[in-house]
Image (tube, rainbow, N blue to C red):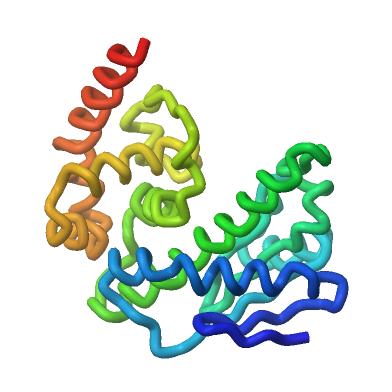
């Protein structure tokens, strides 16, 4: 089955048809902040494939990344978002009890927005003919603009080496990116998004220390 919304083409099975209106409305109503940040409005609609089962999703994911993960439920690749159906969250590390269903569904929608940020980030590369953005910014901005962790109280207990490692907790990516966006001129921030080398050097020379000092001071004030 297929649904065409303002910014996406959804492909899905009949078993997931009850999810699509909520997903498409949520996406259409929450992308403007993403466009404004990257200063891009796409000419084409992104393709979104809703995958009904975790088993099927893992096969697609493994073909792309050569491993599987119980937490993975969505990824963006080559103009398409692959997104696990909410109906099979029971087979992921994001399973929930009935009393948590509304909160889990809200997170489900925000996760789709996260993957949409990756799509726009790719358009940003093409617009500026630049290299891939540093990992901490790629994931940090996707979390920041999808508001996945807005209501979370996260301790900044990460090291510089962790942030430079590809397996760093996403909470660290989020906090360092949040500090960058909220404390530096936007034109400079977008420069960093165009050069992973410059972004990583700035992280090592200035950003990490300033962010760590800020979050440590904030934590002590809230204690």
Location of the N terminus (image quadrant): bottom right
Q: Nearer the viewer, residue 70 or 101?
A: 101
Measuring 34% from the left and 15% from the top, which residue is drawn there?
222
Please say if 146 is above or below 60: above
- Residue at 40% across / 22% down in the picture? 157
Quadrant, the C terminus:
top left
Residue 16 in picture, x, y percent from top left: 81, 70
In the figure, 91 relative to 52: above or below?
above
Q: Nearer the viewer, residue 133 or 36?
A: 36
Residue 144 locus on image (x, y percent) = 40, 50
Q: Is residue 92 above or below residue 65?
A: above
Q: Is residue 162 left or right of residue 201?
A: right
Q: Residue at x 77, y 42 (%)?
A: 95
Quarter-wise, where is residue 178 in the image? Answer: top left
Residue at x-position 50% and y-position 81%: 7
Determine whether, in the image, residue 116 is placed left or right of residue 193: right
Q: Is residue 209 left or right of residue 70?
A: left
Residue 61 location (% of width, % of height): 68, 63
Residue 67 shown left or right of residue 167 in the figure: right
Residue 135 seen by the camera: no
């Amino acid at each position: 089955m297929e649904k065409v919304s303002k910014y996406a083409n959804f492909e899905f099975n009949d078993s997931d048809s009850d999810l699509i209106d909520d997903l498409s409305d949520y996406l259409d109503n929450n992308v403007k902040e993403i466009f404004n940040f990257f200063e891009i409005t796409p000419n084409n609609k992104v393709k979104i494939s809703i995958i009904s089962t975790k088993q099927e999703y893992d096969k697609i994911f493994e073909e792309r990344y050569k491993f599987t993960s119980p937490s993975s439920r969505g990824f963006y690749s080559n103009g398409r978002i692959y997104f696990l159906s909410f109906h099979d969250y029971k087979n992921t590390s994001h399973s929930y009890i009935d009393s948590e269903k509304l909160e889990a569904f809200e997170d489900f929608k925000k996760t789709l927005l996260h993957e949409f940020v990756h799509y726009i980030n790719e358009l940003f590369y093409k617009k500026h003919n630049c290299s891939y953005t540093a990992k901490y910014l790629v994931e940090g901005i996707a979390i920041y603009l999808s508001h996945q962790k807005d209501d979370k109280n996260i301790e900044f207990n990460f090291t510089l080496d962790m942030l430079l490692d590809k397996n760093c907790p996403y909470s660290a990516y989020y906090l360092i990116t949040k500090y960058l966006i909220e404390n530096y001129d936007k034109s400079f921030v977008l420069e960093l998004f165009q050069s992973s080398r410059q972004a990583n050097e700035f992280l090592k020379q200035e950003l990490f220390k300033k962010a760590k000092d800020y979050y440590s001071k904030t934590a002590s004030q809230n204690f």
